[in-house]
Image (cartoon, rainbow, N blue to C red):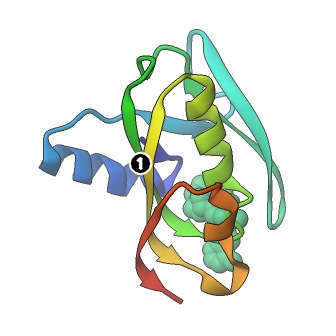
Amino acid sequence: SGIDARGILFGSVLAYRLRIGFVVVRKKGKLPGLTESVAYNLEYGKAEIEMQADAVAPGQKVVVIDDLLATGAGTLQATCLLLKRLQAEVLECLVLIELKELKGAEKLNSIPLFSLLQY
Ligand SMILES: O=P(O)(O)OC[C@H]1O[C@H](OP(=O)(O)OP(=O)(O)O)[C@H](O)[C@@H]1O
Ligand SMILES: Nc1ncnc2[nH]cnc12
């Protein structure tokens, strides 16, 4: 699953290469039908992300991808909570860039994080 907005860009390419399914995690108010959402704090305010309730099947294994991990408290943690509510199994989080100083990886509650670049 890829996170709005830039996580969708990288996640869709990766899923296509791996020939696996892909679902989107979007900012609130952009998805039709029955949805589940989680509110979270950003560095610069509040936001809410949302998924369609039937996007993942119970027990389905999911890898979460985004462009950048900053606070982690944040976007990635809210996404993992959302996927858990939908009863998916979050295997790992991937980001292109990890801002080490903000210690975002520690907030993922033992979900492994892989980052291409640490800065
Ligand atoms: O680790 P965090 O503190 O949660 O911050 C990281 C998030 O912030 C940025 O997205 P933003 O919400 O600015 O939106 P965008 O992707 O639509 O630009 C970035 O793309 C991550 O998703
Ligand atoms: N600290 C940061 N630097 C760059 N992009 C960001 N997006 C969210 N937090 C950020």
- Name the residue at 53% across, 77% down: 98
How far from the left and from the top, in percent, is residue 101?
68, 87
- Name the residue at 47% across, 14% down: 54
How far from the left and from the top, in percent, is residue 44?
83, 65
- Name the residue at 60% across, 10% down: 34
Question: Dividing the picture into quarters, in which one does residue 81 lie?
Answer: top right
Q: Is residue 99 left or right of residue 7?
A: right
Looking at the image, the residue that sits furthest to the top is: 33
- When the figure is inspected, residue 78 is found, relative to residue 94, above or below; the finding is above
Number of numbered discs:
1
User: Can I make out residue 18 in this image?
Assistant: yes
- Name the residue at 41% across, 17% down: 57
Which residue is under mark 1? 8
Looking at the image, the residue that sits furthest to the right is: 45
User: Can I make out residue 30 in this image?
Assistant: no
Looking at the image, the residue that sits furthest to the front is: 110
